[in-house]
Amino acid sequence: MPPAGTVTSNSQPSNAQPGNEGSGYTAPDPQTVARISAEIVDLLLPHRRASDPEIDTTPDDFPLQLEQLADFITAGDPILFTLPGFPCKSPNLAKVLGHLPDEGERLSLTFLNGLCEQIGKLYEPGAQILICSDGHIFGDLIHVPDDHIDEYSDELTAMIEREGLSHLATFDLRAVLGDLPFDEKRARVHEKYAPTKEELREQILTDEETAKLYRGITRFLTEDTFGFEGTKSALQRDCRARAYGVIQRSRAWGDLIAEQHPRSFRLSIHPQKAGVLKFGIRLLEHSDVWMTPWHSSVLHRPDGGWELKRSEEAEKVGRLVERNGRPSHYETS
């Protein structure tokens, strides 16, 4: 099994796209290209994680994405999606079952692979999602050790192989900057790509979407901090400062991904407005727009549905289920 820092065999190399040179591929007419592009966006819309849910969107509200899809379809290339996320489990055991991927990740990966399969029915060359695990880029700021992040990422790659999810591949900080220590890699990526704290502070003051992200990350950091020796107000100050760093590193990671994979459709696990560069994607059912499988556990309901809940809440209504000798999820009877 290759480490999660490599692009696995079912993916394309870092900067290459599979072309159809010499294959006899004939590009569809512009009308057909536009129709297929709109059908693919329409397929994604029910799963959109929106920061503007009050708007009833259509494919026409996503011109950037339609343009990207048209480029792939005209060339006859498989569509490449990049998705930063799946960093590591929260260190707060009131939320999660441990530091390794569990049923939440398995269901999410299966869902993403299924989306690619559905796209393949609309467009024969199909699609692939490159999961760009971002745990290492800010692991020091969220107080998760790098060895836990390695173990999470390696199990994620193993899960993809074990489940036969052939449309997914993985990428993380181990794939760049050689064998440098993680602290040095983080510093170099931050220096090259991250916005300054002053630039970010101005965005938080003037842009509501950035302000929401800042507040959400501050909340997560506050919930996930253990053993802090100080007052509640001191903890808030510490978490607000670290939230700046997390956003800076996340932005830097996004720019690095864009540089490594310049020709891709960019997905995000964060809520996004219609028409912006990133398309927000919802992985599983949940009541909190910020909740993810790595900040929660999964509850299997009597109706067959699955939903994300804090582990301590799921435990009150369900029994713990194990898979392969490890806690997996909760199930109601």
Image (cartoon, helix red, strand yellow):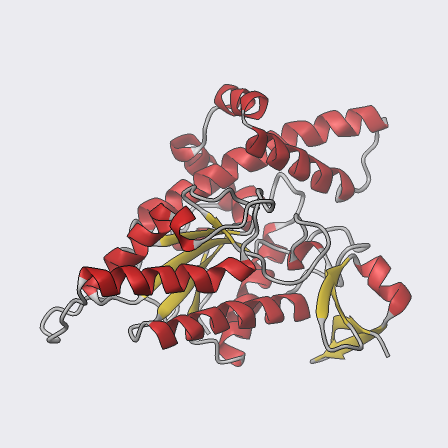
Give the residue displayed 24% in from the left and 56% down from the top.
71
Give the residue displayed 65% in from the left and 55% down from the top.
292
Asked which quadrant contains residue 327, the reply is bottom right
Question: Depth check: 78 or 230 in front?
Answer: 78
| Vertical placement of residue 191 versus 67, above or below | above
Question: Depth check: 136 or 275 in front?
Answer: 275
Q: How many marks?
A: 0
Tell me if 97 is positioned left or right of 265 in this view: right
Tell me if 251 is positioned left or right of 11 in this view: right
Question: Depth check: 306 or 57 in front?
Answer: 57
| Vertical placement of residue 180 versus 127, above or below | above
Tell me if 228 is positioned left or right of 149 in this view: right
Residue 286 horizontal/vertical position (percent): 70, 58
Residue 4 horizontal/vertical position (percent): 47, 63
Question: Depth check: 128 or 158 in front?
Answer: 128
Give the residue displayed 37% in from the left and 77% down from the top.
121
- Residue 177 shows up from this direction: no
| Vertical placement of residue 107 versus 265, above or below | below
- Residue 55 shows up from this direction: yes
Residue 262 horizontal/vertical position (percent): 30, 49
- Check the picture and name the quadrant holding the C terminus: bottom right
Residue 318 horizontal/vertical position (percent): 86, 71
Tell me if 200 is positioned left or right of 291 in this view: left
